[in-house]
Image (tube, grey):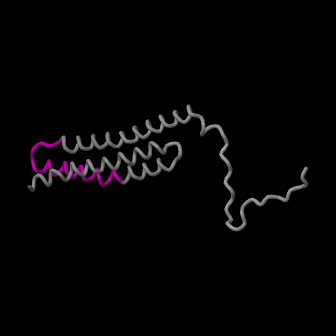
Amino acid sequence: MTGPQPPEQPYSPEFRVPPMTPVQPGGLDDPADRKRRMRMGILGAAIGLAIPLILVGIAVALGLGNDTGGTDAWIDSQFFLLAAIVLASPAQLVAGVILAMVQRTRPFGVGFLIGAGIGAVIMAGACFVPLAAANA
């Protein structure tokens, strides 16, 4: 038998860093739970990617759909698309970052950020490609 042990220091004094605690077996090692989390993460990312792209599709349809053939209508549609880029993209980026910071909504937030980036590129293309084609 051993005698009383000296009290263990809570952390190494030379580094002032607390020691790592071992991971308890259970939740992270369960294959069925890991598979469920993976499916939910992929589903959340896919939905997060789809929502901004649906919004972009609606904006492009509204912006380009009201073309009556005149120059004023064409300028109005381009202005609508440019306003959608300027106003919607920052709001989507802020929402995506906030969603990505929360643990339970992280896959959805990452998909939302990717979708917002793709949507901004699509809307910029829909806004500026007709300008380039008209000048060519």
Determine the residue positioned at 21% across, 51% down: 127
Q: Nearer the viewer, residue 54 or 136?
A: 136
Q: Is residue 6 left or right of residue 41?
A: right
Give the number of callouts: 0
Pinpoint residue 17: horizontal percent, then vertical percent.
67, 62
Pinpoint residue 32: horizontal percent, then vertical percent.
56, 31
The residue most toward the top is 32
Q: Is residue 89 left or right of residue 7?
A: left
Q: Nearer the viewer, residue 1 or 93?
A: 1
Q: Nearer the viewer, residue 70 or 58?
A: 58
Q: Nearer the viewer, residue 1 or 17?
A: 1
Q: In which quadrant of the rendered image does the C terminus lie?
A: bottom left
Determine the residue positioned at 13% across, 50% down: 72
Residue 77 is inside the magenta segment: yes
Determine the residue positioned at 34% across, 50% down: 117
Say above or below: 129 vs 24: below
Pinpoint residue 23: horizontal percent, then vertical percent.
65, 45
Q: Is residue 27 left or right of residue 130?
A: right
Residue 22 is inside the magenta segment: no
Q: Quadrant of residue 62?
A: top left
Query: The magenta stretch spans which residues?
Result: 66-89
Q: Is residue 26 left or right of residue 74?
A: right
Q: Quadrant of residue 28?
A: top right
Determine the residue positioned at 14% across, 55% down: 132
The residue most toward the bottom is 14
Magenta span: predominant SS is: helix
Say above or below: 80 vs 11: above
The residue most toward the front is 1
